Amino acid sequence: MKKGINTICTHTGELKDDTFKGAVSPLYMSTSYAYEEVSEKRYPRYFNTPNQQALSKKLAALEKTEAALVFGSGMAAVSTALLAFLSKGDHIVLQKTLYGGTFNLVVEEFEHFGIEYSFTKGLSREDFEKEIRENTRVIYAETPSNPLLTITDLRMVGVLAREYNLVSMVDNTFASPVNQNPATLGIDVIIHSATKYLGGHSDILAGAVCASEAHIERIFSLGKNLGGSLSDYTVWLLERSIKTLGIRVKAQNKNARKMARFLEKHPAIARVYYPGLKHHPDHRIACEQMSDFGGMLSFEFDPSVDQVSFLKHLKLIKPSMSLAGVESTILSPAKTSHALLSEQERADQGISDRLLRFSLGIEDKSDLIEDIEQALQAVGWGVEVN
Ligand SMILES: *Cc1c(COP(=O)(O)O)cnc(C)c1O
């Protein structure tokens, strides 16, 4: 029977407590399991403890794939998925705007492995197709991207992958499975940093990969050797967190949509980047492939606003790293995620020093807006100086 997203979040995969009839999945912390007369030899690094398998079922149901694996971090998921399909002499095409950790993995490590790579110049079909070579094996995208929330056409990526016999991979962290299911758009491998929306409370580091049985088998066979699995206690906490994924993300979508409209009209704001706004260059593709536009937006103040001082005066919204928690956070990409790029490289990517990335939490919208207004007032914005 086809279940709704909130029912999947709450129940799919849950373990029955046959001994005490408790309402939630029991936690099995054992690292040692019997080996005689068992169908499967269990060990946490083999991704097959009861809690790991239970959570994998939930994740696969959320992403509408046959199978899933849970990892110790988003980067363990990214690196294991990539290396499972890339060997010495192979080539990968990646989209130009990528999460910093993924970019670093590729440019700092792939040369030692003898893996070749190219980044696209833009996000169109031509931009991806131009980079495909004889030895290309994987095509990799991330949408919405960080921090400008550009949208990559996932159907196009899937079609291109099938035409050239490549494995398509998408980092679906920013959208979460609530707003976008790449598998239904023809993507083979879906990756999450579960540290973000899946965890949702800024207290879990984890990752996930969702794909067909065949693709997961290949990722598993490398993954058990690399050893990036997640400990069962955190697996259990993540299962608990995902029970509220649907309602959290829907509240975050709504806050982001309303905040984008508020900021867009505000005279202190020069520019807002949110795929749900009609003037966003990729709005049409976002409408086609996403059910809602997510809880992330970016904006730039008018140059007259002292941004550093504004951030210091916020009382509710936290200027802090990472994203997707139930609490609203804000950061300067130029000072954090993109600090290692040169000023020119940032400018080429359209990331100005005045850009702020805003991760909407689940607080009441009126309190978030009041916080922004009072911080603007505190920095003297809007006060006549003559
Ligand atoms: C955070 C993040 C990652 C990496 O995840 P970790 O859990 O920090 O290892 C990968 N992709 C995206 C889009 C992210 O935001």
Image (cartoon, helix red, strand yellow):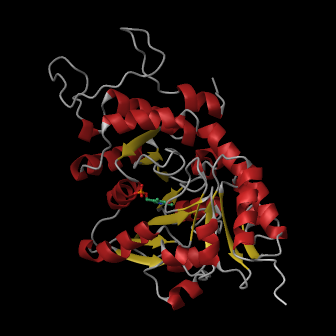
Q: Is residue 93 above or below residue 72?
A: below
Question: At which x and y percent is residue 233?
Answer: 34, 34
On the picture, is 329 further left or further right than 110?
Answer: right
The one of 293 and 47 positioned closer to us in this rendering: 293
The one of 247 and 269 positioned closer to us in this rendering: 269
Q: Is residue 300 above or below residue 15?
A: below
Q: Quadrant of the C terminus?
A: bottom right
Q: Residue furthest front?
A: 386
Asked where in the image residue 106 lies, by quadrant, the reply is bottom left
Q: Is residue 45 above or below residue 267?
A: above
Asked where in the image residue 153 lies, by quadrant, the reply is bottom right
The residue at 77%/51% (across/down) is: 366
Q: Is residue 56 visible?
A: no
Asked where in the image residue 152 lies, by quadrant, the reply is bottom right
Question: At which x and y percent is residue 155?
Answer: 64, 59
Q: Is residue 273 visible?
A: yes
- Image quarter for ligand 1 equals bottom left
The residue at 56%/74% (across/down) is: 128
Q: Is residue 55 above or below residue 367?
A: above
Q: Quadrant of the N terminus?
A: top right
On the picture, is 76 further left or further right than 276?
Answer: left
Question: At which x and y percent is residue 248?
Answer: 63, 41
- Count of number-bearing discs: 0
Q: Residue furthest left?
A: 36
Question: At which x and y percent is residue 137?
Answer: 41, 66
The residue at 53%/78% (across/down) is: 334
